Image (cartoon, helix red, strand yellow):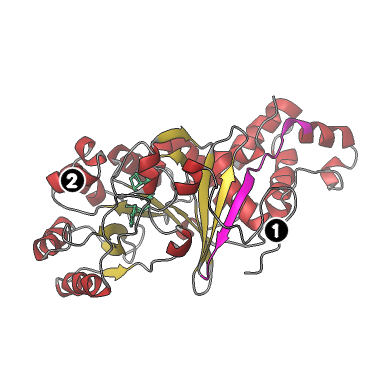
């Protein structure tokens, strides 16, 4: 069976090459660079293989690049959403977000999600399967080599709960930040979790105990949305497993690298539910002692039965009340909602196939897409 080269960190690939071909780094280094700098597993022409063309062919046969098929491309002025299909038919969505000076990629880590938050489109899909590290990395590869977009930031905020797929998540981070390859700095990456306490603690331990891993500056975002256990459990079932007190103690112990680093607290604002003055006071108290930035996300509509979206004045009132209470915070721009690519909207295409959608970009793999961005 051929192997997926995108599922190997550089050290994993080196070990595999040593086992298969006798030499590790000597062959793994040019292979890894070629893969991530040119999007190719072709090795002939590289000095290490001048005298070993049959080995170059063997490596190419053993490691097959299997990028998912692009089924649909939707775009608006701030974002591009891709519906991708993996060879087993599993579908996910991934979103390129154009910020003022750079592009960020919102990647999925799972097909669906087991956590079932009531306000989230992905939660409604239920859980289909985890993505492999290679399938996570492939989202960035496609965007770079097929759309020609160099992303400098990766947010693990697409479909799925990243810490429910911890091992593959960590391999994908190792691959994406490798300077021989995509070279996306850890400080440009953010993991968003619904409050998976063991995942937060495991990451904290790794940051503390393995500084050479180079993930000290990785950002953590936690989706909080309420500081009342009863209320939070009603919309986020994960709170019944790891309630607010356990989450808070994990956040208090999370290592932050510099004074200015903060944990991002995602707060989806739902009018009449979590925007009242006691919610503001509760949030400020809850975050006492945790260097944090609250990102207020106006609730986005989902396919059916979601929560209402707050008006601009309601968002502003909440923001001002937090600022007055001394809490560092900002309002997250709503990007991509016209193509249902905003926070919590991923899954409609992936769940139901791509019916009733316009396709202004291109579809299918094989040919690079010429989208001007
Ligand atoms: C889809 S989740 C994926 C990452 C992870 N599972 C989590 O919950 O943090 C990314 C962010 O979208 C938020 N979100 C989900 N549904 C939303 C909605 N309808 N409106 C606004 N934000 C939403 C989540 O709370 C979370 O902060
Ligand atoms: S908000 Fe996050 S954890 Fe909750 S269902 Fe959506 S993807 Fe899963």
Which residue is at the far top? 1
User: Residue 74 in magenta?
Assistant: yes
Q: Position of residue 147 (x, y in %)?
A: 66, 59
- In terms of depth relative to the viewer, which is nearer, 342 or 287? 342
Q: Is mark 1 within 8 Å of ligand 1?
A: no
| Front disc: 2 or 1 | 1
Residue 173 in sight from this viewpoint: no
The N terminus, quarter of image: top right
The C terminus, quarter of image: bottom right
Which secondary structure lies at badge 1?
A: loop
Q: CA distance from mark 2 to mark 1?
A: 45 Å
Q: What is the span of residues highlighted in magenta in the rendered image?
A: 61-77
Residue at 42 percent across and 38 percent down: it is 166
**91 w.r.t. 373: above or below:** above
Q: Which mark, by number, is residue 290?
A: none
Q: Is the residue marked by circle 2 packed among few (<14), some (14-19), or many (20+) residues within 10 Å?
A: many
**104 w.r.t. 203: above or below:** below
- Direction from residue 90 to residue 194 in the image, left or right: left
Q: Which mark sits nearer the N-terminus, 2 or 1?
A: 2
Q: Which residue is mark 2?
A: 244
Residue at 41 percent across and 43 percent down: it is 160
**64 w.r.t. 83: above or below:** above
Q: Position of residue 372 (x, y in %)?
A: 66, 69
- In terms of depth relative to the viewer, which is nearer, 34 or 78? 78
Residue at 72 percent across and 26 percent down: it is 20
Q: Which residue is mark 1?
A: 369
Quadrant location of residue 6? top right
User: Residue 45 in magenta?
Assistant: no
Residue at 19 percent across and 47 percent down: it is 232
Q: Is mark 2 within 8 Å of ligand 1?
A: no
Which residue is at the far left? 278
- Direction from residue 345 to residue 147 in the image, left or right: right
């Amino acid at each position: 069976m051929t192997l997926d080269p995108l599922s190997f960190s550089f050290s994993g690939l080196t070990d595999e090459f040593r086992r298969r071909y006798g030499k590790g780094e000597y062959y793994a280094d040019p292979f890894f660079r070629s893969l991530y700098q040119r999007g190719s597993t072709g090795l002939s022409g590289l000095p290490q293989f001048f005298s070993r063309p049959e080995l170059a062919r063997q490596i190419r046969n053993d490691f097959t690049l299997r990028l998912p098929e692009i089924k649909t491309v939707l775009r608006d002025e701030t974002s591009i959403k891709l519906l991708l299909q993996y060879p087993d038919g599993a579908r996910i969505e991934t979103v390129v977000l154009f910020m003022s000076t750079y592009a960020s990629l919102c990647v999925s880590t799972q097909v669906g999600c087991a956590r079932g938050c009531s306000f989230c489109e992905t939660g409604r899909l239920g859980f289909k399967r985890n993505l492999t590290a290679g399938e996570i990395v492939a989202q960035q590869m496609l965007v770079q080599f097929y759309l020609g977009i160099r992303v400098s930031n990766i947010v693990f905020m697409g479909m799925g709960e990243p810490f429910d797929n911890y091992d593959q998540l960590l391999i994908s981070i190792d691959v994406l930040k490798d300077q021989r390859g995509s070279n996306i700095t850890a400080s440009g990456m953010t993991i968003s979790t619904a409050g998976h306490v063991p995942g937060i603690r495991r990451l904290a331990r790794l940051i503390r105990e393995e500084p050479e891993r180079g993930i000290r500056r990785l950002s953590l975002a936690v989706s909080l949305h309420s500081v009342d256990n009863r209320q939070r459990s009603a919309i986020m079932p994960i709170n019944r497993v790891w309630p607010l007190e356990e989450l808070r103690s994990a956040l208090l112990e999370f290592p932050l690298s510099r004074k200015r680093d903060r944990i991002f607290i995602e707060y989806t604002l739902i009018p009449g539910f979590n925007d009242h003055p006691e919610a503001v006071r509760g949030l400020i108290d809850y975050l006492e002692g945790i260097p944090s930035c609250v990102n207020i996300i106006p609730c986005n509509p989902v396919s059916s039965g979601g929560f209402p979206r707050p008006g601009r004045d309601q968002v502003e009132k909440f923001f001002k009340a937090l600022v007055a209470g001394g809490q560092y915070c900002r309002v997250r721009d709503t990007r991509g909602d016209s193509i249902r690519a905003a926070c919590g909207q991923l899954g409609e295409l992936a769940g139901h196939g791509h019916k009733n959608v316009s396709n202004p970009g291109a579809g299918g793999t094989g040919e690079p897409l010429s989208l001007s961005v």
